[in-house]
Amino acid sequence: MEIYKDPISLFKQTNFSNTIWWKLKVNISAYQNETENKLVTEIFKNRSFRLLYPNIHKRNYKYLRILVQLYEDGYVCWINLDGLIIEKCELIENQNLKYEHSLIKEKIPSILKWIQKKSELNNKYLWGGTLGPNFDCSGLIQTSFFKHNINIPRDSFQIKSFCKHLFNFKESYSALQPGDLLFFGNKEKCDHIGIYKGDGLYYHCSGREFGRNGIGIDSLKQTNDKISLHYKSKLISAGRVVRSYRWDKTIR
């Protein structure tokens, strides 16, 4: 059985450097701030992070959480020290792939099939959910790409900025291709995301109040379905994933 050291002792060995990267050896939950239990994301085993705060050994206070930044998407969140199992890791620099867009395009059918299989399981909407079977809207999309070795940002508004912009929505969806992402919200902010399946249909994970409380299929076509009509009224734009996220050392 492999024995792992207490994370605090590991951080001390590196003088709490924010340039050292650590690999998670367990799935964990992450939170919005240092004290409240508001889930913002779930983090897979084997993902990497760096420590942002605090420099624990300089203070006479028992810290229960640390602020970290994830390598694969730049996401900043708080994680519990209790139950944290980590090891130091050496990151392999991401290389710019000349044919990256084509490689991503080839994976779209598999990504859509993965989402279909998840939709067939018992599931419900979970704010911050990424591990499954329960997801939130952007957690479903991010994880579906992540499982196919394509890193994209965590939240829907971040994904919208990251994608290649296709067009703002008016009436037509004829230019959409399977795998294109649909963004919903208002003029101020995107707050929901789905992925186009084809033939006017898309997958998304919607909540209980206005949606299906889990992963479902809705339509961009003319319909009397109240849920489809609700989300169609909130459509902002469409985008396409043409690259994988690259670490750029910017704290978001």
Image (spheres, helix red, strand yellow):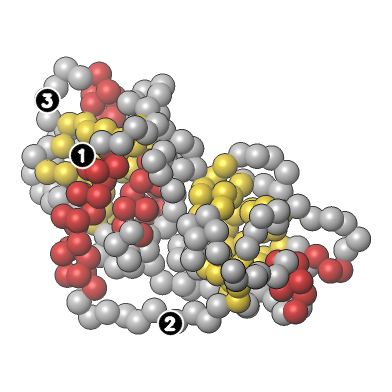
- Is residue 155 in sight in this rendering? yes
Q: Earlier in the sequence, mark 3 or mark 2?
A: 2
Front position in the image: 187 or 196: 196
Q: CA distance from mark 2 to mark 1?
A: 34 Å
The residue under the point 84% across, 69% down is: 57
- Circles 3, 2 touching at the beta carbon (< 8 Å): no
Identify whether 111 is placed above or below 227: below
Q: Nearer the viewer, mark 3 or mark 1?
A: 1
Q: Which residue is mark 3?
A: 222
Residue 187 seen anywhere in this rendered image of the structure: no
**Residue at coordinates 29% horizontally, 68% vertically from top-left?**
243
Answer with the quarter of the image where residue 189 lies. Answer: top left
SS under mark 3: loop
Q: Is residue 14 left or right of residue 125?
A: right
The answer to whether 226 appears left or right of 248 in the picture is left
Residue 77 image offset from top left, x and y in percent: 60, 54
Q: Report which residue position mark 2 lands on.
A: 93
Q: In whole angstroms, how far apart are the C-alphas of marks 3 and 2?
A: 47 Å
Q: CA distance from mark 3 to mark 1?
A: 14 Å
What residue is disc 1 on?
202
